[in-house]
Image: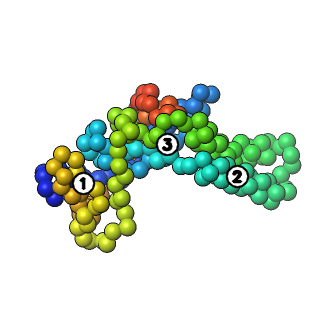
Amino acid sequence: MCDRCSFEIELKSYLFSYCLYELPDGGHVPIPTRAEWCYQCKTVRAVENLPDITATRKKVRQAKCTNLRFFAGCSSLSPGSPEMDYATKFFAQQFLEPAENLHYVVLNRKSPSRCLSCGSFDHKEMPLSGYPAGKRTILPIKHSGCEGNFVIDDRCPVMAEIRGPDRYYTPEGIFLRSVSPF
């Protein structure tokens, strides 16, 4: 809430794993997000939280190492067996492909992170954790327009939205379409 005007928003704990980059090969990768103040939307929105190239490269290496350690411990599975084929596909889908896909997005990205609602580059991170429990905390960010201070009151109940429509974006963060899972 703002301590100067009537602006107030109930922050929900969203699981934004349904926001996906659609890759040129038809593959998809979840978009890493965080809550930020969007100056265009004039409210708190989910914004791309792009890791740096070093972090994505490290994740790819870790996924490859995880796969190698697993297969080194699978002496009971014979190469080319249906069980080994299944295990290979499972580990690739769970670990290696998502890491490689996110690395591809970051490696080829030309624009900065965008607001996933309006596409704006004009946003500021809202530090929403690490504050004393049960207290009102003034955040180090001003509310545009009235220049009041944002205040978090964590004594309010937190709601959770588990699933919404799948939202697809280009690797540059441009909205493509929304598809209902129901």
Tell whether label 1 touches label 2 (CB within 8 Å).
no
Mark 2 nearby-residue class (10 Å; few <14, some 14–19, many ≥20): some
Residue 119, quarter of the rendered image: top left
Q: Which residue does the image show at 62% across and 28% down from the upper left? A: 25
Q: Which residue does the image show at 67% across and 46% down from the upper left? A: 96
Kindly report the distance in space between the C-alpha atoms of the residues bearing marks 2 and 1.
Answer: 40 Å
Position of residue 159 in the picture relative to residue 27 (left or right): left
Residue 28, quarter of the rendered image: top right
Residue 87, image x, y percentages: 73, 47
- Marking on residue 31: 3
Secondary structure type for disc 1: strand
Tell whether label 2 touches label 3 (CB within 8 Å).
no
Please give the count of numbered marks on the rendered protein: 3
Mark 2: which amino acid?
Arg
- Of discs 2 and 1, which sits in the foreground? 1
**Residue 50 visible:** yes
Quarter of the image that includes the C terminus: top left
Secondary structure type for disc 3: loop
Mark 3: which amino acid?
Ile
Earlier along the polypeptide chain: callout 3 or callout 2? 3
Earlier along the polypeptide chain: callout 3 or callout 1? 3
Which residue in the structure is indicated by mark 2?
A: 61
Residue 61, image x, y percentages: 70, 52
Mark 3 nearby-residue class (10 Å; few <14, some 14–19, many ≥20): many
Which residue in the structure is indicated by mark 1?
A: 142
Kindly report the distance in space between the C-alpha atoms of the residues bearing marks 3 and 2.
Answer: 20 Å
Residue 59, image x, y percentages: 64, 52
